[in-house]
Image: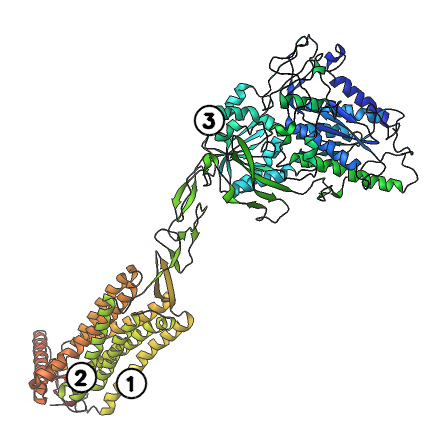
Amino acid sequence: MAQRLFHASVGLKLHWQVVMLIAVCTAPSRAMHQPHLKHPIHVCQPGDIHLGGLFPVHFGIESETSGFLSHPLTAECIGFNFRGTRWLMAMMFAVEQINNNWALLPNVTLGYKLSDTCNTICKALEATLAIIIGNFRENHLWGSPTCGGFNTLGVVGATGSSASMAVANLLSLFNVPQVSYASSSRLLSNRQQYQTFLRTVPSDDQQSAALADIVHHFGWTWIGVVSSDDEYGRPGIESFRNHAEANGVCVEFANAISRYDSPEDVQTVANIISNSTTNVIVAFASGTDLEHLMLEIVRRGLANRTWIASDGWSTSSLVARPGSFNILGGTLGLALPEGHIPGFRDYLLRTHPNRWPENHFIKQLWEFTFNCTWRDDKQNGMQIADKEGPTLSTSKENGHEVPGWPFCTGKENLSAVETPFLKYEALRVTYSVYQAVYTIAYALHSTMSQCHHQETCDTPQRPKLRGNFYGNDGISMSFNAMGRPHHLYSIINWQADGENIHFQVVGQYNGRAFPGNRLQLNHSKIVWNGGHSEVPYSHCSSPCPPGTRKGLLKGVPYCCFKCQPCTDGKFSNETDASNCEPCHDDFWPSSNRTTCLPKNIEFLSWKETIGVLLTLSSVLGASLTIFFAFIFLKYRQTPIVKASNRDLCILILFALFCCFLSALLFIGRPSPANCKLRQPAFVISFTVCVSCMLVKTHHVLWAFNERMPGRKHSANKRRRQVFLVIPYTAVQVGICAMWLILSPPFLDPQSSKGTICLICNEGSPIGLVSVLGYLFLLACFCFLMAFRARKLPENFNEAKLITFSMLVFFIVWLSFVPTYISARGKLIAAVEAMAILASAYGVLGCAFVHRCYIILFRSELNTVEEVRCCTAAHTFKRAARANLRQAKVSQKRQLYGSSASEHSTASKPNASDQLYSVSGDGFTTLT
């Protein structure tokens, strides 16, 4: 381009001084004594605009230990990295494609300067300084044809998060955009600190969530964790633990490792893993940091453990060695999605040192692929590494080649050998590099298009890396405001492929999907450690079966627990339940506490033995009552029936009939109406019974103590006695009505173990005490009056029979009170029914059995003459007693000088000693 697009401003001169100071401080001191490094770490291609590239062509560095009194030694790169070289070639291929695309960056040729970071921070900074220095040389254009001083408007890399952080801090000083193809640390999402940093891989926040979801998906709750001791491992494993612990996962051990750990440190971590009880270990680390630990794990033969790999080592050739499959087979890991780069395989197959004679990395690739050396390297020492992974240091001493390594002829064929460089089946990081280059290219294209419409572009124009971009394969690459791409991972499973390890894709994780749909796994494709198809078991404690719950143990993680059976009334229907759920009120847990069953409804059933007995007793009592009533009605004109006041007797029998039937209300399934009727039905009917006996007793006393002899007792007088029962009964009815209105009895289901007992709650205790108290009060009055009349004629001896009836009533109900209080459940109804029946039978037996016996079997006693004889005998007996008593009084008075008139007065018979006879309507005077 003819127009000048970029020049250094005065303010950038200060930055240039800072860069020079950093360069001087970081340059090896030994370089002052050597004119050049042993091997160049850069490869460049001139162009109008240049992109920097940072790639780990070697696995690490090796340096001799030097003290403070000697010059610092230059760090040498060791361990040739075939995959890192393929990544570098992917950038070269992408730049070549872009230059051949007339629609992208027209009239502009992209150049590059690619550097080897040796997988370390210091080499990454050294390479970055070498790239940036060209931006601040005076008097140059974008289209400078040399690599010595060119304009770099973007950097692709680095690989590790720690290296990318250091590079990002340096590039941000000069506002140079950086797009990493493998750095995933969540710390790089800080836009305030890393303003010019973007990446084509998801953040570790998503990776941590994905790993936690995998652990949770398989139900593992007891795991160990290992992480790199750097900016990749520490934040990543911290985020993972937060996600995992939120899912109820416990961590047995957590250890940090580093590639710089001593053998003793590696042994310590290996011992912890060997002594652990977990079967699942999550490793959030890079392959270089994990290499030495895995070699020790394989050496010890620590099998039967499932490893969960982060993307830092899930496809690493340093760990996935053929000899380690027996120990590490079945590993599940996260990896970047596979990508397809059209034409890239052919591009790799055309790789040859003659094609790029200045590209020292391709020469090294050739040497370590074919185990040969180039003749033109005699004058230089060489660090040779075993292509299979571990570094094997060898050197060319005094210009002589190492025995066994022939000279390279250049006729070797890459397609004829098996090398990781050509492993094209799953391009993951390689495709990410490809996307990163196209991302910067499209951003430059957009920026230069805007600049083209301006008159001049004398100010620096950096590419704006935001929005959506489309690669040569038509796949969209988008960045949000935080510089993050889409959150998508492939889930791979380490499976055997002959002597090698094959990374089989068994699912994917989409962080943008709804929770619950993010993890997709094909379980049929997974092969676990040892070739098993069953999911490994990893729990601190055995799962608690349904019917139990997890009981936490003091001083241990909550994943370690003791299974405790659910308590009464609770159940659990799932494995490893944290709590037992209570059953509803009408349900009760099954015997194994796994479900709730309807409770057995318990009440005094008609089918139970006690229910049948009470029913028979009630029916028998009612039948006897009807029978006695029939006898009294049939023989109503006989003297004994007349003397008993047949109207009151029929009323008593009717009341007893109701009492017997009221006992049936206490049997069977209670209902709200049943509860309200049972107590009033009994107390009212029995009140009628007691009131009738009270009136009869009072009438007998009145009849034998009447002081107006000769007065006839009409039928109206007899019937009037029936109406005297009404006031006594009305009081009881009133009490019952107030009870039912204010606080009536109600159905009260009472739950207990496995049963619901249907009982009637009496509502207000005052109501129950009031009705029974009134009934007891009437019984007391009746008993007292009957006791006074106990010595009347035997054929009129109502009082004696009533006395016995009331005694039975008192005994029954005094026994009832403590029994009622101590009874529980359906026995309460049984106790009440028995008390009612006993009271009714007591009255029926004492008041009517004797009379019916005389009527039916002793008819000679049921005559007027017999009644008169008994009455006369009773009257004469009373008169004799009265005369004797008067005689004794007279003798006492004579002794004390009493007058004769008083004696004659005292000797007159009392009106009460007159004889009475029974008529059809009552009592008549005999003398």
| Gap in angstroms between the C-alphas marked 3 and 2 | 111 Å
Observer-nearest of 523 and 427: 427
- The percent coordinates of residue 576 (x first, y second) are 44, 45
Q: Mark 3 or mark 2, which has the lower sequence index?
A: 3
Q: Mark 3 points at which residue?
A: 301
Q: Name the residue under label 2.
A: 644
Residue at image position (28%, 60%) is 823
Observer-nearest of 277 and 152: 152
Query: Can the viewer see residue 615?
Result: yes
Q: Which of marks 3 and 1 is in front?
A: 3
Q: Name the residue under label 1.
A: 723
Label 1: state its secondary structure. helix
Left or right? Give the position of 904 relative to 424. Answer: left
Name which quarter of the figure residue 283 lies in.
top right
Tag of residue 788: none
The reply to whether the C-beta atoms of the residues labelled 2 and 1 are less than 8 Å apart is no
Q: How crowded is mark 2: few (under 14 residues within 10 Å), some or many (20 or more)?
A: many
- The percent coordinates of residue 19 (x first, y second) are 79, 23
The reply to whether the C-beta atoms of the residues labelled 3 and 1 are less than 8 Å apart is no
Q: Mark 3 or mark 1, which has the lower sequence index?
A: 3
- Which quadrant, please, contains the C terminus? bottom left
Q: What amino acid is found at the position of numbered circle 3 in the picture? A: Gly
Q: How crowded is mark 3: few (under 14 residues within 10 Å), some or many (20 or more)?
A: some
Left or right? Give the position of 599 relative to 34. Answer: left
Q: What amino acid is found at the position of numbered circle 2 in the picture? A: Ser
| Gap in angstroms between the C-alphas marked 3 and 1 | 109 Å
Q: Residues within 10 Å of mark 1 (few under 14, many from 20)?
A: few
Residue at image position (59%, 48%) is 515
Label 2: state its secondary structure. loop
Location of residue 275 with respect to 472 vertically, above or below: above
Q: Nearer the viewer, mark 3 or mark 2?
A: 3
Q: What amino acid is found at the position of numbered circle 1 in the picture? A: Phe
